[in-house]
Amino acid sequence: MPLHPEIAAYLAAQQARQGTAKPTLAELRQGLAATVPPLHARPTVAQVEDRVVPGAAGDIPIRVYTPWGPPPYGLFVFFHGGGWTTGNLETHDVNCRQIVRASGWRVIAVDYRLAPEHPYPAALDDCFTVAEWAAHHVQELQGVPGQLAVGGPSAGGNLAAAVALKARDTGAFTISKQVLLYPATDLDMRHRDRYPSRLAYGQGYGLNLYGERSHPYLRTPEDALDPYVSPMQASDLRGLPSALILTAEYDPLCDEGEAYAFRLVEAGVHVEVKRFLGTIHGFMFHFSELPDYEEGFRLVGAFLRK
């Protein structure tokens, strides 16, 4: 399916502004921060509270979103996107509010440490710590026992899949569902033809891969072979929580997201997967006026409520 005209216009404008030069990390962080709408323009929820969770490296900031309606609530621990190097509680505030409104669940957003200042496993450690804290504070959070989900977009989807793997492996707590929105599932860049979508859409479609052999999230290239970095590298996916995986046709990460969905199904995990046609990576972040944006959050809400 051709690119949606509004998305094609967005990409053309982005290309005109940016040219072929790779933006600096400071420019990427400033650009993402500039997308945050004013508070009065964001979806409303019953309550938003900033808190901290104790972590091994210090307090981890979190933001707790409460839906309208009485407790108890399902608990959804949300990890923001941004390539492990950008993003914070503010940049994905609207996404969290949309999930709350679509699902009726309480959302707990995590402000995990970013690379390259804090490479792997810092982000995973922070995300796992908050998910474990939520699992052990269900009563305080007015949660429903047994309804703890993790999820997020892009790098957040990667972190959610890794948290689910680590929770299964350690037995520290139980996750009931994982929501992976256009996730990165394989950071091994040695075999770029493994996923044709990387070659087809790795330049000019909003998420530019620039041909890196490694990533600032990694301490060394060998980290990409760690299943908690690249869930596709896990040898056994049995016993993982049910998954919702949404992908985009013109996303370089499309094939690896769907490949992970297929492997989960092979392992006996219940999976719901949908590819959104005519759209790009981050379509549930940038394009609130398009039907796919609303449909994506509708699917997340329906999956959580099942």
Image (spheres, rainbow, N blue to C red):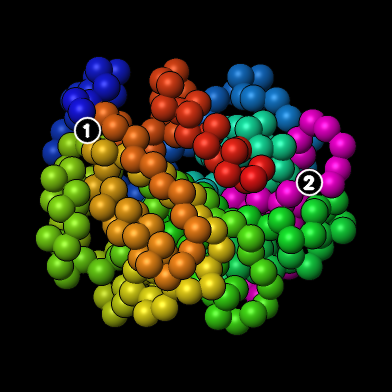
Magenta segment boundaries in residue numbering? 51-78
Closest to the observer, 37 or 46: 46
Task: Say if the magenta span includes residue 47.
Answer: no
> In the shown orientation, is residue 45 left or right of residue 234?
right
Is label 1 in a helix, a strand or a loop? helix
Residue 45 in the image, given as x and y percentages of width and height:
73, 30
Residue 53 in the image, given as x and y percentages of width and height:
73, 62
- The residue positioned 54% from the left and 58% from the top of the image is 242
Front of the two marks 1 and 2: 2
6 above or below 48? Answer: above
Residue 33 in the image, given as x and y percentages of width and height:
48, 36
The image quarter in which residue 266 lies: bottom left
Which residue is labeled 1 in the image? 18
Residue 188 in the image, given as x and y percentages of width and height:
25, 69
> In the shown orientation, is residue 134 left or right of residue 37?
right
227 above or below 25? Answer: below
> In the shown orientation, is residue 149 left or right of residue 212?
right
- The residue positioned 21% from the left and 66% from the top of the image is 189
Which residue is labeled 2 in the image? 73
Indicate which disc, 1 or 2, sits on the residue closer to the N terminus. 1
The image quarter in which residue 281 lies: top left
Residue 225 in view, yes or no? yes
Q: Estimate the spatial distance between the alpha carbons at disc 1 and disc 2, rounded to whole Å.
A: 43 Å
